[in-house]
Image (spheres, rainbow, N blue to C red):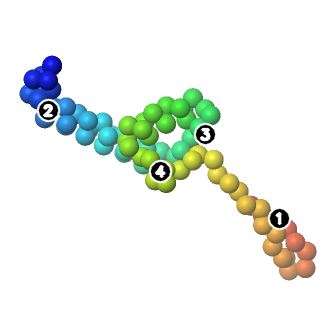
Amino acid sequence: MLETLTSNIEIIVSTLTGIITIASIVIAGTATPDPDSALGKVYKVVELLSLTVGKAKETGKKEVAVEEVPTVKGKTEKIK
């Protein structure tokens, strides 16, 4: 078994490199879906394959801050 691994190391390394590269391209080119959806679960697997960890990724849930801004007539309006 060890002989098989050592004799095919070039194929193994190139295959792993290809998988990581393709997964990274997919992750970089798509918006992060909601983690609770089915697509979100598939996305998480592809994200692991692309080695995207830590703060190098988005969460998929966007926080919207509501601010009050003064208007011309002195009233305030809430904007998103």
Mark 1 — residue? 78
Mark 2 — residue? 9
Eye-nearest disc, 3 or 2: 2
Task: Decide if residue 27 is in sight here.
Answer: yes
| Amino acid at pointer 3 | Asp
Image coordinates for residue 48, horizontal then vertical, percent: 42, 38
| Res. 37 image quadrant | top right
Considering only order in the chain, which callout, 3 or 4, is on the residue closer to the N terminus? Answer: 3
Considering only order in the chain, which callout, 2 or 1, is on the residue closer to the N terminus? Answer: 2
Q: Residue at 10% x, 23% y: name it.
A: 3
Eye-nearest disc, 1 or 2: 2
Considering only order in the chain, which callout, 1 or 3, is on the residue closer to the N terminus? Answer: 3
Mark 3 — residue? 34
Whole-number angstrom distance, CA of label 4 to CA of label 3:
18 Å
Report helix, strand or loop for mark 1.
strand
Whole-number angstrom distance, CA of label 4 to CA of label 1:
34 Å
Above or below, comparing residue 8 to residue 31 in the picture:
above
Q: Residue at 62% x, 34% y: name it.
A: 36
Report helix, strand or loop for mark 4.
helix
Image coordinates for residue 47, horizontal then vertical, percent: 44, 40
Whether pointer 4 and pointer 2 mark residues with C-beta atoms closer than 8 Å, the reply is no
Report helix, strand or loop for mark 3.
loop
